[in-house]
Amino acid sequence: MTIGRTRRWPILFFSLLLASIAGVVGQQQWQRFKQEQGIERLECKGWEFSLKGLRLQQFNIEMHNDSGQLKLAAHDVQVSLDKLLNPLPVQGLRISDLSIAWFPEAKLDQSSPPTTLPSRQDLESWLGWMPRQIMIEALQLELPCATGICREKGSLQWQQSTSEALPVSLEIQIQHDKHLLHLSASARQITDKVELSLHLALDGNNRIKSRQWLASEADKLAWNGTLGLTELPEAPWLLNWLNPWLTYELSSLPASPEAMHLQTSWALQLSPADLKQIHGEFSTSLYLPVPWPIPGLGQVQGNLDITLASRMNSWLPISGSSDLNIKPQPELFKTLPTELRPERLKIKITPIANSGTQSPLSFKLDLLSQGKSELGLQSPYMQISISPFIVKMEKTRVTFKVPQLSVAGTAFKSIQTNLQLEGKLDATHASIRTLSGSTATLQEIKPIDVQGSAKQILVSLNNLNFNGHLLNNQLINYDLQGPLKLKLGSLYHSQLHSRAWQWQGQIKLDSRQLDLNGKLANDVNLKFTTHLNKNFTGSLIFDGTLEPIQLNTGNPITQTLSNWPKLLELNSGRIQARGRFELPPGKQVKATLYLESQGLSGIYDRIELNQLNSNLVLALQNQRLQVDLDGFRLEQANPGLRFGPVILQGQYQAKLDQPLAGQLDIRKAHAEVLGGEIWAERGLLNLAVSKQTQAIHVKGLDLAQLLLAYPAEGLQGSGLIDGSFQLQLENRNVSIEQGSLAARNPGVLSIKSPRLQALGKSNPAMQLVTQALENFHYDLLASDIRYDKHGKLQLGLRLYGRNPSLERGRPINFNINLEENIPDLLTSLQLSDRVSETIQQRVREQLESDKQPTQP
């Protein structure tokens, strides 16, 4: 960084004094100069001239530019000149009272050009403008600090050689309450080097001493030096003074702190064009018996002895030991969640004896971070080699504990990790491997917006391998791979029964993607094969396959899903499924599920199911749901009347936010019933409309089987029945309108019911009917059909024919209206031995429940 405007202000101050004396600057040039320098106010009062110089009673200037705002007020200013016509350099400047207020501008753009040093020619030029002697008797400073605005007062003296730029000396005194800080600095030329000396005294006692040497070596600058502090009994009042300038609160100190010391030396080579390019060695020995503020770090207590060497643009230790306690500045970790911010750090480095001075540095490392969480690192053996650069660690243990943690809408409870590591780092490669016993445990994970949680989590992290590739100390790519095992003691969700789960597989993680491949299972033997892939610039894809379930050994799905239909029992057959979930970046979710069943048998509600085979495909894309049903074949269903096979084919589509208001495309719906068949016409049902109509056809229904299935005695007949009707769906209720059935050909109907015969004996008009129906040969058998939403079936039966044994077979025509409650009929069938005992028990329980009085 080249010299800034803040450094030019002292020079500008003296220039303005001379410019004010001369008074010959043109108005336009003066206004332009003020605008360029950001001068908003300039005021000079009480001029007095003499052959030896001038005197001002008051000088005020206010400047505001992109660096900040400066206010300067000087009283009783005396300028001594050697020659009036040749005033530069100024021989002396004396100011009785100088007040400076400086408020820097906040920088939105934190980027900055490389920091640079001025050349020797520039320094000599600036020193040539400086007065040879400066005396500021009363100096008052007003500067921004951590607590707002801080004010300091003191004095300043500057002394420079009259002929050369060097030697120079500077004396600064700052007074705080009854205490005095005195800083003296000097620079002088010794052959080809510049020697710098610095002394700091507190209340008249010398405390800090530093000597430094600067020398040019080709395009480099050699900088060697030492700095020492032997003791600091003034620490209490000094820390109290520094407290307003710090961004954190200091710990209390004892009234008489123990001796503290600091010894530092360095031998460095700098690049004047970029001060970040530093090479050399730096050594320090520090002992702090009480917490002491270190700018940019925090409060430090303990001892440190270390020597660092610059290699590959990094500072590496070549020898040293430490035992430090640090209270870090809160700002250092403000980007971390509150629960993870360290409040105290402990660092202990214990060297291990080497065979010689050129041997790699070997040491033990103990690091502990404490706060709401606790992080520890213990390594019994670490080694650092400078040439070639190699860092090794063996049997290193990393522990982490935090009682509570909330991250990304998820609450974690009681996290504990225990990692056993070994690794190696060189200039181009880093490798770390987890050893046996590496685990992480959590008591609970609970998403804040989801009704569910996982408890008693154990993650096994053994034998994971991390490899990274470096370029110029930057990690350019990496990969992590190895086995991973996850156990959940219990998983809670409103759609699941609480079960223990386990996932075991392989993890592959690199700079491009995350890949997890393994098997998932729970404690009732529900098993999945899973594969998750997340491309960091692409989609998240999850593939899962349900391993085939043989239901004759049990149904783990019913023991896993809490919303499994209670009235559905499957006791044999096979189920398998597979699916894919895909989340493209910035796009909508895509998902597909394939469900296949083979030979399923069981019970649904009051219906026995036997040998169900199906292929079901569910797809989600563009916020639309699609269900394809293909290959559905149920060999037999028995709600009290056996029928089958039943074959269904179709497709359902709906918007995702209205899943029950879609369109059902019926491609095939066919069933074999009582020797005949029933099917629905192909059509499209719009479930968003409350009322739907579907045409149903009947063909070849065997009258003999129908009468045999009806729960009454003395019914026989022959013939095949055909017909059709309109099935109406309205608000989930079923009804039939405009239906008709008719016998395909003439046949025989025989009704020998004891109840009907008894009715004929008591009623002569009915006697002819009962006799005719005992052996009625019909020519026409037809009926109208109606069925209402309450389950009542109405038949308008037309029966034309004769009984050959009655009145020489004369024609007889019957018009008979019949009614039957189909739910009651099915109930009576289901109470017989035509269905399983399970269905009979369900019917009896329902009948008992219906008898219970309704609660008011």
Image: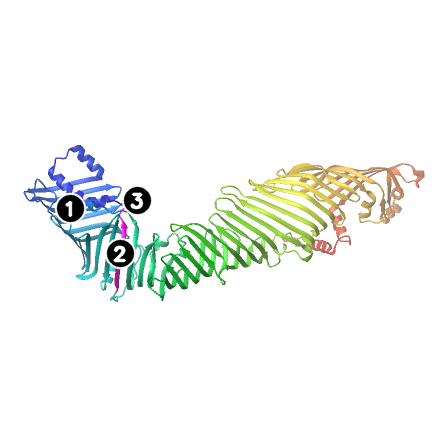
Whether residue 852 can be seen here: no
Up/down of 699 relative to 252, above or below: above
Residue identified by numbered label 1: 130
Q: Residues within 10 Å of mark 1 (few under 14, many from 20)?
A: many
Q: Quadrant of residue 173?
A: bottom left
Cα–Cα gap, marks 3 and 1: 28 Å
Is residue 734 found left or right of 581 in the rendered image? right
Magenta residues span 260-273
Residue identified by numbered label 2: 267
Q: Residues within 10 Å of mark 2 (few under 14, many from 20)?
A: some
Residue visible at 59% across and 56% down? 521
Q: Amino acid at mark 3?
A: Pro
Q: Residue furthest right?
A: 808
Residue visible at 17% across and 40% down? 42
Total marks in image: 3
Cα–Cα gap, marks 2 and 1: 31 Å
Kindly state the secondary structure of the residue where label 1 is placed. loop
Answer with mark 3 or mark 1, whichever residue precedes in sequence: 3
